[in-house]
Protein backbone atom coordinates (compact mmCIF):
# COMPACT_ATOMS: atom_id res chain seq x y z
CA UNK A 1 0.00 0.00 0.00
CA UNK A 2 1.27 3.40 -0.98
CA UNK A 3 1.78 5.57 2.08
CA UNK A 4 3.34 8.67 0.59
CA UNK A 5 1.13 11.10 -1.29
CA UNK A 6 1.63 14.28 -3.30
CA UNK A 7 -0.62 16.81 -1.55
CA UNK A 8 -2.33 19.34 -3.83
CA UNK A 9 -0.92 22.85 -3.56
CA UNK A 10 -2.89 24.93 -1.02
CA UNK A 11 -2.77 27.88 -3.47
CA UNK A 12 -2.95 28.47 -7.24
CA UNK A 13 0.33 28.02 -9.12
CA UNK A 14 0.60 31.75 -9.77
CA UNK A 15 -0.62 32.84 -6.32
CA UNK A 16 2.86 33.59 -4.95
CA UNK A 17 3.86 35.90 -7.81
CA UNK A 18 5.75 38.15 -8.17
CA UNK A 19 7.92 36.60 -5.46
CA UNK A 20 7.82 32.96 -6.61
CA UNK A 21 6.74 32.40 -10.22
CA UNK A 22 4.12 29.95 -11.47
CA UNK A 23 6.92 28.40 -13.53
CA UNK A 24 8.96 27.67 -10.41
CA UNK A 25 5.95 26.32 -8.49
CA UNK A 26 4.87 24.09 -11.40
CA UNK A 27 8.31 22.54 -11.69
CA UNK A 28 8.97 22.36 -7.97
CA UNK A 29 5.66 20.70 -7.07
CA UNK A 30 4.91 18.82 -10.29
CA UNK A 31 8.42 17.53 -11.00
CA UNK A 32 10.71 17.74 -7.93
CA UNK A 33 8.20 16.95 -5.20
CA UNK A 34 6.33 14.42 -7.36
CA UNK A 35 9.57 12.64 -8.15
CA UNK A 36 10.40 12.26 -4.43
CA UNK A 37 6.90 10.87 -3.79
CA UNK A 38 7.04 8.43 -6.70
CA UNK A 39 10.54 7.21 -5.79
CA UNK A 40 9.61 6.90 -2.11
CA UNK A 41 6.62 4.70 -2.90
CA UNK A 42 8.61 2.54 -5.31
CA UNK A 43 11.40 2.08 -2.75
CA UNK A 44 9.22 1.22 0.28
CA UNK A 45 6.97 -1.21 -1.63
CA UNK A 46 7.38 -4.70 -0.21
CA UNK A 47 9.72 -3.58 2.59
CA UNK A 48 9.18 -3.29 6.34
CA UNK A 49 8.64 0.42 5.78
CA UNK A 50 5.58 -0.04 3.56
CA UNK A 51 3.01 0.18 6.37
CA UNK A 52 4.73 2.65 8.70
CA UNK A 53 3.66 6.25 9.28
CA UNK A 54 5.76 8.74 7.33
CA UNK A 55 7.50 10.09 10.44
CA UNK A 56 8.39 6.55 11.57
CA UNK A 57 9.80 5.73 8.13
CA UNK A 58 12.00 8.85 8.35
CA UNK A 59 13.32 8.06 11.83
CA UNK A 60 13.81 4.32 11.19
CA UNK A 61 15.41 4.64 7.74
CA UNK A 62 17.83 7.30 9.05
CA UNK A 63 19.35 4.58 11.25
CA UNK A 64 19.37 1.92 8.51
CA UNK A 65 22.54 1.95 6.38
CA UNK A 66 20.69 0.00 3.67
CA UNK A 67 17.85 2.52 3.44
CA UNK A 68 19.58 5.72 2.33
CA UNK A 69 17.36 6.06 -0.74
CA UNK A 70 14.22 5.51 1.31
CA UNK A 71 15.29 8.12 3.84
CA UNK A 72 16.19 10.72 1.21
CA UNK A 73 12.99 10.38 -0.81
CA UNK A 74 10.52 9.99 2.07
CA UNK A 75 12.09 12.86 4.04
CA UNK A 76 12.06 15.08 0.95
CA UNK A 77 8.38 14.23 0.34
CA UNK A 78 7.67 15.19 3.96
CA UNK A 79 9.75 18.41 3.86
CA UNK A 80 8.09 19.62 0.66
CA UNK A 81 4.59 19.04 2.06
CA UNK A 82 5.60 21.22 5.03
CA UNK A 83 7.02 23.88 2.68
CA UNK A 84 3.81 24.30 0.65
CA UNK A 85 1.69 24.63 3.77
CA UNK A 86 4.10 27.28 5.12
CA UNK A 87 3.23 29.79 2.40
CA UNK A 88 0.17 31.74 1.31
CA UNK A 89 -0.31 34.85 -0.82
CA UNK A 90 -1.81 36.69 2.16
CA UNK A 91 1.03 36.05 4.59
CA UNK A 92 -0.41 37.61 7.70
CA UNK A 93 0.97 37.82 11.23
CA UNK A 94 1.37 35.29 14.06
CA UNK A 95 -1.68 35.03 16.29
CA UNK A 96 -2.61 33.99 19.80
CA UNK A 97 -0.32 31.56 21.61
CA UNK A 98 2.29 31.54 18.82
CA UNK A 99 2.49 35.34 18.82
CA UNK A 100 3.06 35.31 22.61
CA UNK A 101 5.67 32.57 22.37
CA UNK A 102 7.57 34.43 19.61
CA UNK A 103 7.72 37.43 21.95
CA UNK A 104 9.08 35.23 24.76
CA UNK A 105 11.65 33.33 22.67
CA UNK A 106 12.80 35.93 20.12
CA UNK A 107 11.72 39.32 21.47
CA UNK A 108 9.59 40.17 18.44
CA UNK A 109 8.66 38.98 14.96
CA UNK A 110 11.35 41.13 13.33
CA UNK A 111 14.03 39.32 15.37
CA UNK A 112 12.61 35.93 14.33
CA UNK A 113 12.46 37.04 10.68
CA UNK A 114 16.10 38.15 10.90
CA UNK A 115 17.13 34.79 12.32
CA UNK A 116 15.29 32.91 9.54
CA UNK A 117 17.03 35.12 6.96
CA UNK A 118 20.48 34.78 8.51
CA UNK A 119 20.20 31.01 8.96
CA UNK A 120 19.01 30.61 5.37
CA UNK A 121 21.78 32.80 3.97
CA UNK A 122 24.52 31.00 5.92
CA UNK A 123 23.28 27.48 5.20
CA UNK A 124 25.89 25.93 2.91
CA UNK A 125 24.55 24.07 -0.16
CA UNK A 126 21.19 22.30 -0.33
CA UNK A 127 18.86 22.03 2.62
CA UNK A 128 16.10 23.44 4.75
CA UNK A 129 15.43 26.15 7.34
CA UNK A 130 12.59 25.79 9.81
CA UNK A 131 10.93 27.40 12.78
CA UNK A 132 10.30 24.48 15.11
CA UNK A 133 8.72 23.77 18.45
CA UNK A 134 11.24 21.68 20.36
CA UNK A 135 8.78 20.70 23.07
CA UNK A 136 10.19 23.42 25.32
CA UNK A 137 10.72 26.44 23.11
CA UNK A 138 10.63 27.82 19.59
CA UNK A 139 13.88 27.58 17.63
CA UNK A 140 15.22 28.31 14.14
CA UNK A 141 17.10 25.30 12.77
CA UNK A 142 18.68 24.30 9.48
CA UNK A 143 19.20 20.87 7.95
CA UNK A 144 21.29 19.52 5.08
CA UNK A 145 19.93 17.76 2.02
CA UNK A 146 16.87 15.73 3.04
CA UNK A 147 17.31 15.95 6.82
CA UNK A 148 14.33 17.17 8.79
CA UNK A 149 13.23 18.31 12.28
CA UNK A 150 11.35 15.00 12.55
CA UNK A 151 14.69 13.35 13.36
CA UNK A 152 14.90 15.40 16.56
CA UNK A 153 11.18 14.95 17.28
CA UNK A 154 10.78 18.68 16.73
CA UNK A 155 7.56 19.99 15.19
CA UNK A 156 8.09 22.20 12.13
CA UNK A 157 5.80 25.26 12.21
CA UNK A 158 7.34 27.06 9.21
CA UNK A 159 9.53 25.27 6.65
CA UNK A 160 11.64 27.02 3.99
CA UNK A 161 13.30 25.16 1.10
CA UNK A 162 16.81 26.48 0.39
CA UNK A 163 17.65 24.05 -2.40
CA UNK A 164 18.53 26.04 -5.53
CA UNK A 165 15.54 24.60 -7.41
CA UNK A 166 13.29 26.62 -5.06
CA UNK A 167 14.52 29.96 -6.45
CA UNK A 168 16.97 29.61 -9.32
CA UNK A 169 14.46 30.22 -12.15
CA UNK A 170 13.30 33.43 -10.45
CA UNK A 171 16.37 35.02 -8.88
CA UNK A 172 19.21 32.77 -10.09
CA UNK A 173 21.84 32.52 -7.34
CA UNK A 174 20.40 35.29 -5.14
CA UNK A 175 19.25 33.18 -2.23
CA UNK A 176 19.15 36.20 0.14
CA UNK A 177 16.62 37.89 -2.17
CA UNK A 178 14.45 34.74 -2.32
CA UNK A 179 14.53 34.47 1.47
CA UNK A 180 13.79 38.14 2.04
CA UNK A 181 10.77 38.12 -0.28
CA UNK A 182 9.41 34.87 1.14
CA UNK A 183 9.86 35.89 4.78
CA UNK A 184 8.38 39.37 4.28
CA UNK A 185 5.43 38.40 2.07
CA UNK A 186 4.61 34.71 1.93
CA UNK A 187 4.90 32.97 5.31
CA UNK A 188 1.44 31.72 6.26
CA UNK A 189 1.51 32.82 9.89
CA UNK A 190 -2.18 32.07 10.30
CA UNK A 191 -1.56 28.42 9.42
CA UNK A 192 1.58 28.29 11.60
CA UNK A 193 -0.42 29.72 14.51
CA UNK A 194 -3.08 27.03 14.01
CA UNK A 195 -0.40 24.32 13.94
CA UNK A 196 1.01 25.66 17.20
CA UNK A 197 -2.46 25.72 18.80
CA UNK A 198 -3.04 22.12 17.69
CA UNK A 199 -0.02 20.99 19.74
CA UNK A 200 -2.08 21.70 22.84
MN1 LIG B 1 12.52 21.57 -3.09
Image: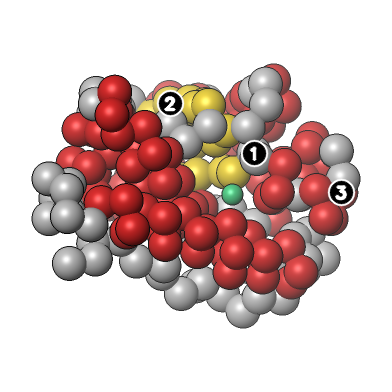
The residue mark sitting in front, 2 or 1, is 1
Q: Nearer the viewer, residue 163 or 48?
A: 48
Q: In x, y percent, where is residue 134?
A: 30, 27
Q: Residue at x 70, y 49 (%)?
A: 165
Residue 196 in percent (x, y) is at 31, 47
Q: Which residue is mark 2?
A: 139
Q: What residue sits right under mark 1 in the picture?
A: 162
Image position of 153 with respect to 73: above or below: above
| Disc 2 CB within 8 Å of nearest ligand 1 atom | no
Q: Quadrant of residue 169?
A: bottom right
Residue assigned mark 3: 171
| Point 66% across, 70% down: residue | 26
Residue shown at 66% from the left, 75% from the top: 13
The relative height of residue 129 versus residue 122 in the rendered view (above or below) is below
Q: Which label's residue is closer to the chain start, 3 or 2?
A: 2
User: Which one is earlier in the sequence, the residue at label 2 or at label 1?
Assistant: 2
Left or right of residue 54, residue 77 in this image: right
The residue located at (36%, 53%) in the rendering is 40
Q: Picture coordinates of residue 87 (x, y %)?
A: 56, 59
Q: Earlier in the sequence, mark 3 or mark 1?
A: 1
Amino acid sequence: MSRITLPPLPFAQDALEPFISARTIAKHHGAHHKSYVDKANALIAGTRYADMDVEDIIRESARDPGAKGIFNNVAQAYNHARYWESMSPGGGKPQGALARRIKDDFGDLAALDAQLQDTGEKHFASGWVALVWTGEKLAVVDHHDAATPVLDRHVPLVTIDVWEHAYYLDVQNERPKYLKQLIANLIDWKAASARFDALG
